[in-house]
Image (cartoon, grey):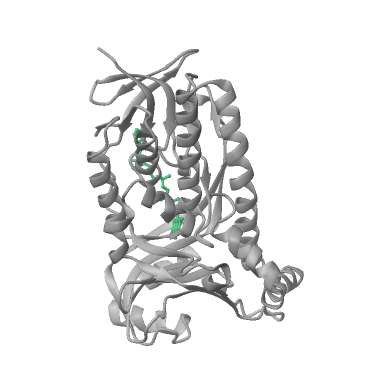
Amino acid sequence: MSIETQALVVGGGPAGLIAAALLASSGVPTVLAAPPAPADTRTTALMHSSLALLSKIGVWPQLSPKTGALKKLRLVDASGGLIRAPEILFDSTELGLTAFGHNIENTHLLAALHETLAGLPHLRVIASAASRIAPGPDRVEVTLENGEEISARLVVGADGRNSTCRDAAGIDAKIWDYPQSALTLNFSHSRPHNFISTEFHRRGGPLVVVPLPGDRSSMVFVNTPEELAMLARFEDAALGRELETVTHGLLGRILPDEARGARPLSGLSVKTFAARRIVLVGESAHVLPPIGAQGLNLGIRDAAEIAELASAALAAGQDPGSPALLAAYDKARHSDARPRQIAVDLLNRSLLADFLPLDAARAFGLWALAALPPLRREVMRRGVALADR
Ligand SMILES: Cc1cc2nc3c(=O)[nH]c(=O)nc-3n(C[C@H](O)[C@H](O)[C@H](O)COP(=O)(O)OP(=O)(O)OC[C@H]3O[C@@H](n4cnc5c(N)ncnc54)[C@H](O)[C@@H]3O)c2cc1C
């Protein structure tokens, strides 16, 4: 016999877990279909507005001591071009905040979310993937790999970049590759980070170091796959020395953890965020290069939007999967995600191009940010999405 529910969330990555928690905690009867997620040693910088949503579902108090505050963000033009941008330091106090956000190890984030989900009324968690998704006029019928059948008025597709939900909704995705990979690792260092996250804009791509608690930080190093493959072969001490060089000695001696990750960079965008009673959240709808910590922050705002719309619809006795609700979701998420995707893509491509006019445009943009406090504040507000939520 099939389980009837208002909302079914498909996918147990961070976006899916947060969507399920926000839906259920705003009173929407929800089922979460989430096969166990693979181990992930990466960290994620979550901005102020995302942390406010984690507080709303009660996850933040237990997570907070395990995270590194991002009080300042520094951009360094390390492209080596003829025209170089000035170094720029964004300070969260300029926005009246104590921090732009916090850097969280994904394992801690996922564990805290699972703990919270286990205590939520209105939520049933099933550790199985969706194998068949059939949207109909009034409900979506879903079969899980464990054989269970679910009938939902709304499906939230949080099943990542190769989304089955997206296919079932008939939504086309534009997918492209960058000639870059990202090396991710966490490390100890001899100099304090002073809660400053630094983004070096290098010719091969950005290199970002982000504070963790104590004298520890995480790194995302974007470069050509060949360069990164060479680094991956280094033993710890040699890799540490290489990282000290590329970070210009900023954090002193570097001792990398053994666990490292590497993945090719790609991008993904969709024409619409919703169709046929299915809405997309997280990487099923948008994949960006890791610049400016936008990816999951966008995914969390997707989750918040659908929870708000679905709970308001149910409270008004309306259908949470109606065409009008899907259109409202698409409009809201498009206007938030699209400009950020374009900006991140352009910045990444400008680093790859080694083209003087592009270097000049990037340098001028950063010079204007350094010189004009109102412009800088507006960019900071948008970066942490203060205006959006
Ligand atoms: C190097 C790097 C650094 C990054 N740093 C940041 C950062 O600092 N800040 C930030 O905001 N973002 C960052 N991001 C982006 C962020 O990691 C992603 O946005 C986020 O992990 C995507 O989460 P998700 O839940 O949408 O997708 P995923 O984590 O891919 O989760 C999808 C889940 O769906 C499940 N699934 C798939 N198919 C099915 C199915 N049929 N049924 C059920 N479940 C299914 C999968 O098993 C998986 O668990 C970074 C990305 C990279 C690559």
Q: Is residue 272 visible?
A: no
Image position of 326 with respect to 270: above or below: above
Q: Is residue 193 visible?
A: yes
Position of residue 64 measured from the top left corner of the image (x, y, whole percent): 32, 62
Q: What residue sits 68% from the left and 73% below the top?
A: 373
Position of residue 157 measured from the top left corner of the image (x, y, whole percent): 43, 33
Q: What residue sits 52% from the left and 40% below the top?
A: 285
Q: What residue sits 47% from the left and 80% below the top?
A: 246
* Residue situated in front as seen by the camera: 1 or 233: 1
Figure label count:
0
**Relative side of 307 to 43, left or right:** right
Image position of 251 with respect to 56: above or below: below
Q: What residue sits 77% from the left and 70% below the top?
A: 357
Image position of 323 with respect to 93: above or below: above
Position of residue 385 measured from the top left corner of the image (x, y, whole percent): 56, 55
Outermost right residue = 357
Q: Quadrant for the N terminus, please.
A: top left
Position of residue 76 measured from the top left corner of the image (x, y, whole percent): 57, 78
**Relative side of 384 to 221, left or right:** right
